[in-house]
Every structure is written in structure tokens, then in C-alpha cells.
């Protein structure tokens, strides 16, 4: 019997992943690393407090030697050198098969931004990943459509993304406390698949989200070192691509790669959480950081250009891959909207390929060929652009913090969009679906965070909209009423009554307006999921 208590309900085939040995491994991870995780979360809060007083972030003096030093990360394994197109998506069974059949080089199997950590998703995702690794995954839809792998010997490299450090897994209790969600997602996948993957000529590869410092990267590195030894696979088998998607992490790209150098595969420009992080970090720093409408902030804004080019420069200097981010446009049945979506994604991928990225993300199988074509044009006969050094790039702290130079307006339309998207996304999240198409854009936890934090920022920084209206609590409350009524109208009364709309609205208003800014939307939303489970 394991020392871990499983409090989650029954999930089909859970016995295959929640084995006593796997649970013992999770208990080991929690015992060794849970305390450091708690300390690092406290350090995040302290640093943000400090920044709110100084309004400033800078490159660290104490790690100058690492930035100036001459070192590289471990060479990429043979199956992981060509990453020109990576499809992202939840680990839901049908979507997993579609991703594996998509023709992409990599599947980012998402247990994070695109996933609600419902117990059924946490365990079901691991079951699906286990089958995906073994090439046996198959599915019959309720409509009777059969899904299986078109060519099990030629599928994308699988790269799961565990939860960020901030979320706990309440359904697994140890010593009277929940386990760290990230350790559960990592631990179960690693325990069941590391050896199998290595025998198949691949390896246990991961994306690591939402880190705020190189000390957090050091914790992951310690976890990896222990896990490899415990399970009996060579040191360095794990390869991690770190999302640079928080503003403090942008100042520690070298340091993060250095901490993980035996295990590092690259960095990814996670633009949506990055924007959220800039708003969150500088939410009370006044007009210099008050951004225009969410949809007006593109990758050509000075601060975004600086961040993405610094990422390419840093990666290639260290022999690590630079992977582009997500253009949120998805295919549409309306031909005109569809053409615009493809044109925008093409422009985004062309910018990335031209900047030297080695590949990029797409949100939908329909976009795989486009991304592949654009990057193939830039790569030529090479599998990547590691040889392309960006010595021409010189990025200062001021460049990274140039939020005030972002062109665009603050409009009522933008405010209404934030409200609609935020409420609609949260109601979907509460029901277990963490990725949705809304108004022809992919919405996930990161994009919803921007919506709610932007309202908070506008409200607390006395923003006046182009309409002449000042953003006040009264204005936001009125627009929430109107947008909520419009959502009910478009969804239909009966379907609306069956959803979690009231809870979504309550949560959204709390996260967007409460003076006490919740660090992550998903923290109160997860508490709501637990409450709904018990209801
Ligand atoms: C900020 C970030 O972190 S970005 C990364 C995290 N976000 C994501 O991964 C989002 C990924 N994308 C998605 O989840 C989806 O594309 C959505 C929810 C946006 C839209 O999905 P849908 O509404 O189902 O789109 P659509 O109806 O066009 O799908 C057509 C088919 O493609 C499949 N599909 C769509 N997107 C994906 C995907 N990313 N992976 C696998 N299959 C997919 C659908 O399942 C559907 O399959 P079917 O024909 O067998 O039923
Ligand atoms: O995870 C990616 C992002 O853009 O956020
Ligand atoms: Mg993200």
C-alpha cells in the first residue's frame, strides 16, 4: 500500500497508471522537492512585491559569469533535431490521435494551458499518453467514427507539458497535504514511459511552463537527476524545452539554460503568458505599463520583438533550439475569415523563421502544412537553424520593459471582448475543456489570464477608453451584465442553464476586479472545480 491517498473518483483504466510503484515514486518526489517548491513560490511573491515598489527588473548581477561564460547545452538526441512544426493540444483521446496523425514533427501534449486539471483529465491524459507512446492508441467516437494511428512508426515526437509550479493536485494526498501538480504530471509520465521511449529511439522530453527564475529551473534539474537515477535511465535522458513566458524569466534565459544544461533542449517564446506576466508584474506601475487592447499587442510591438529576438540569440549561442509561439488564429468555415486566419498565421511564422527560430507552434492540424512550408523555406536542407547566430541583436532591460511603446488603443470593444472571452472560457474550463475556439481565436488559460488581468490593470490605473469613458467598477459591472445577457442569448436558455455560467461569471469578476489580485485565474477556478465535484 502506498503512503499516498487517492481521493479522486473512479476513472477508466486508472489502475494502469496509479500503480503502487508509481504512487511511491510520486511520494518520493513530493518528499524531496515539495518543500523547495513552496519556498520558490514564496520567493516569487517577495520578488513581485519588490518590483511593485521599484517598478524595475534587471539582469542579475550575481549571475553575470554565467551570461558571460562560454558553455553550451547537451547536444539534441537524433529524433529531436528537426522541430520545424509542433502541434499543441490537450491529451484528450481523440485529439491526441489527431495530433499524432497531423504530420507535425512534435506533439506538445498539453497538461497545462489547454487542460482543466479535472481528475478525469489528469488520469485519462496519462492513460492516453501511455497508449500514444506504445503506438496503440485508438478511439471510437460516440457517433461511431473510428480513430487510430495512420502510421504508428512515423508519429510526432511526444513532449508533454506538466502543470506549472503553482498548482496542487488535490486528489492525491500525502502526509495530509496535496501533491504538487507539476510533480504528478511529470512523475506519472516519466515513471511509465521513460524506458519504453528510450527503447524506441526517443526519450522522455518535456516542455516546462511559467517559470519565473533560474532557481525554479534548478529545481526541475534536481527532479530530473533524481528521477533518472531512481528509474534507472542514463543521466541526460530527459530533455526539457523551457517556456520563456514570464517577464522575470526573460532576464534569466542564459541562467535557466545553464541550470538545465545536461537536460536542456531549448526555449520557447510563450507570448500569451508572457503578456499576462507583464501585466501582472507591473499591474500597479502606472501608464508606462498599461497596455492597449489585447488583440492590438502583436509580436512586432517593441517589447515583444526584443524578447523574441533575445530568445533566439541566447538559444543559438548555447546550442539550444529557439521555438516560436502560438498565433491564435484557427481555421474557420467562413472562407473570408479562414483566408485571413491563414494569412495572419503565415505572416507570424515567416517573421519567426526570418528571425532564426528553429520551428514553431500551431494550434490546429489544418495549420501544420503552412508552418512546415514556411520553416522549410528558411531551413533549406538543414533540420534547424542552430547555426544562425544573432550577434546583431542587442537587447537591454529597457527594451524588454518597453510596454509603454506598444502601439494601439484602449477601446470599449476591447473591454467587452475581454469580458466575453473570459467568462466563456472559464465556463468551458470549469466543465473540463481547457481549450476553446471563440470568435475564431484559440483561447486557453494564458489568453484568458490576459483578459482578466487587463481589466484589472485598466480599472486600477484610471484608464480612459477611446469612447471617452473612464474604466470604473460601475462601467465594468454594466458591461458584464450586457455581455452575460448576450452570451445567454447566443448559447440559448436551456443550454445556458445546463452550463456553469454563473460560477464562471462570479469567478471572472473576482479575478478581474478584486483589489487583491489572484496570482493565477486557475487557482480560484480549481477550488471551484473541487466545490462542484462535491456538490
Ligand atoms: C498559449 C498556449 O499555451 S497555446 C498551446 C495551448 N493551447 C492549445 O493547445 C490549443 C490547441 N487547439 C485546440 O484545442 C483546438 O484547435 C480548438 C479548441 C482551439 C478548436 O478545436 P475545434 O473547435 O474542435 O476545431 P475544429 O472543429 O476545426 O477541429 C477539426 C478537427 O481537428 C481536431 N483538432 C483541432 N485542433 C486540434 C489540435 N490542436 N490537436 C489535435 N486535433 C485537433 C478536432 O478534434 C477535430 O477533429 P475531428 O474532425 O476528428 O472531430
Ligand atoms: O504557453 C504558451 C503561451 O503563449 O502562454
Ligand atoms: Mg503559457
Image (cartoon, helix red, strand yellow):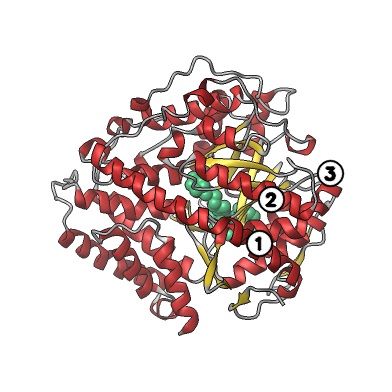
Say which residue appears at 68% left-offset and 75% top-offset. Answer: 142
Q: Distance between the residues labelled 2 and 1?
A: 10 Å
Secondary structure under tag 1 reads: helix
Q: Which residue matches tag 3?
A: 201
Determine contact: label 2, label 3, CB under 8 Å. no
Q: Which residue matches tag 1?
A: 28
Looking at the image, residue 69 lies above or below residue 479? above
Q: Which residue matches tag 2?
A: 226
Determine contact: label 1, label 3, CB under 8 Å. no
Please indicate, yes or no, whether residue 165 appears anywhere in the rendered image.
no
Say which residue appears at 72% left-offset and 30% top-offset. Answer: 75
Q: Is residue 374 left or right of residue 216?
A: right
Please indicate, yes or no, whether residue 276 appears anywhere in the rendered image.
yes
Q: Is mark 3 within 8 Å of ligand 1?
A: no
Residue 401 at x, y percent in the picture: 34, 32
Quarter of the figure with residue 502? bottom left
Secondary structure under tag 2 reads: helix
Looking at the image, residue 270 lies above or below residue 479? above
Residue 342 at x, y percent in the picture: 54, 40
Q: Distance between the residues labelled 1 and 3?
A: 28 Å
Graded by Cα atoms within 10 Å as few (under 14), some (14 to 19) or many (20 or more), the crowding at tag 3 reads few
Residue 519 at x, y percent in the picture: 37, 56
N-terminal of the two: label 1 or label 3? 1
Residue 463 at x, y percent in the picture: 18, 46
Q: Distance between the residues labelled 2 and 3?
A: 22 Å
Viewer-closest of 385 and 327: 385
Q: Which mark is residue 453?
A: none
Quarter of the figure with residue 248? top left
Graded by Cα atoms within 10 Å as few (under 14), some (14 to 19) or many (20 or more), the crowding at tag 1 reads some
Amino acid at each position: 500500500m502506498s503512503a499516498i491517498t487517492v481521493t479522486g473518483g473512479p476513472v477508466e483504466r486508472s489502475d494502469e497508471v496509479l500503480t503502487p510503484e508509481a504512487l511511491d515514486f510520486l511520494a518520493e518526489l513530493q518528499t524531496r522537492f515539495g518543500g523547495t517548491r513552496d519556498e520558490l513560490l514564496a520567493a516569487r511573491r517577495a520578488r513581485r512585491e519588490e518590483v511593485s515598489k521599484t517598478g524595475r527588473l534587471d539582469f542579475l548581477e550575481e549571475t553575470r559569469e554565467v551570461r558571460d561564460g562560454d558553455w553550451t547545452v547537451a547536444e539534441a538526441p537524433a529524433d529531436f533535431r528537426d522541430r520545424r512544426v509542433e502541434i499543441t493540444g490537450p491529451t484528450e483521446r481523440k485529439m491526441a490521435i489527431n495530433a499524432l496523425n497531423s504530420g507535425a514533427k512534435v506533439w506538445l501534449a498539453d497538461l497545462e494551458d489547454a487542460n482543466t486539471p479535472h481528475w478525469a483529465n489528469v488520469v485519462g491524459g496519462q492513460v492516453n499518453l501511455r497508449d500514444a507512446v506504445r503506438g496503440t492508441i485508438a478511439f471510437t467516437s460516440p457517433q461511431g467514427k473510428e480513430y487510430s494511428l495512420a502510421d504508428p512508426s512515423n508519429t510526432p515526437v511526444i513532449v508533454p507539458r506538466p502543470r506549472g509550479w503553482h498548482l496542487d493536485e488535490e486528489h492525491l494526498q500525502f502526509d495530509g497535504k496535496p501533491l504538487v501538480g507539476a510533480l504528478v504530471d511529470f512523475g506519472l509520465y516519466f515513471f511509465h514511459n521513460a524506458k519504453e521511449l528510450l527503447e524506441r529511439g526517443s526519450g522522455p522530453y518535456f516542455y516546462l511552463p511559467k517559470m519565473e527564475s533560474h532557481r525554479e529551473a534548478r529545481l526541475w534539474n534536481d527532479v530530473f537527476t533524481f528521477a533518472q537515477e531512481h528509474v534507472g535511465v542514463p543521466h541526460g535522458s530527459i530533455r526539457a524545452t523551457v517556456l520563456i513566458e514570464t517577464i522575470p524569466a526573460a532576464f534569466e534565459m542564459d541562467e535557466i539554460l545553464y541550470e538545465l544544461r545536461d537536460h536542456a533542449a531549448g526555449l520557447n517564446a510563450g507570448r500569451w503568458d508572457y503578456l499576462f506576466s507583464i501585466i501582472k508584474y507591473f499591474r500597479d506601475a502606472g501608464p508606462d505599463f498599461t497596455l492597449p487592447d489585447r488583440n492590438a499587442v502583436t509580436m512586432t510591438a517593441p517589447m515583444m520583438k526584443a524578447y523574441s529576438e533575445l530568445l533566439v540569440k541566447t538559444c543559438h549561442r548555447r546550442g539550444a533550439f529557439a521555438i516560436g509561439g502560438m498565433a491564435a488564429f484557427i481555421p474557420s468555415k467562413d472562407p473570408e475569415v479562414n483566408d485571413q486566419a491563414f494569412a495572419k498565421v503565415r505572416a507570424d511564422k515567416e517573421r519567426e523563421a526570418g528571425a532564426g527560430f528553429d520551428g514553431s507552434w500551431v494550434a490546429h492540424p489544418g495549420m501544420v502544412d503552412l508552418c512546415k512550408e514556411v520553416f522549410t523555406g528558411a531551413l533549406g536542407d538543414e533540420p534547424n537553424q542552430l547555426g544562425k547566430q544573432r550577434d546583431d541583436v542587442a537587447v537591454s532591460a529597457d527594451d524588454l520593459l518597453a510596454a509603454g511603446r506598444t502601439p494601439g488603443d484602449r477601446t470599449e470593444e476591447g473591454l467587452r471582448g475581454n469580458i466575453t472571452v473570459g467568462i466563456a472560457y472559464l465556463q468551458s474550463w470549469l466543465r473540463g475543456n481547457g481549450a476553446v475556439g471563440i470568435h475564431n481565436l484559440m483561447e486557453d488559460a494564458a489568453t484568458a489570464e490576459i483578459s482578466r488581468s487587463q481589466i484589472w490593470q485598466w480599472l486600477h490605473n484610471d484608464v480612459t477608453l477611446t469612447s471617452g469613458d473612464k474604466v470604473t467598477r460601475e462601467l465594468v459591472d454594466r458591461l458584464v451584465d450586457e455581455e452575460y445577457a448576450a452570451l445567454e442569448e447566443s448559447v440559448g436558455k436551456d443550454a445556458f442553464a445546463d452550463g456553469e455560467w454563473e460560477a464562471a461569471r462570479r469567478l471572472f469578476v473576482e479575478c478581474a476586479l478584486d483589489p487583491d489580485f489572484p496570482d493565477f485565474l486557475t487557482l480560484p477556478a480549481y477550488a471551484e472545480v473541487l466545490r462542484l465535484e462535491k456538490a
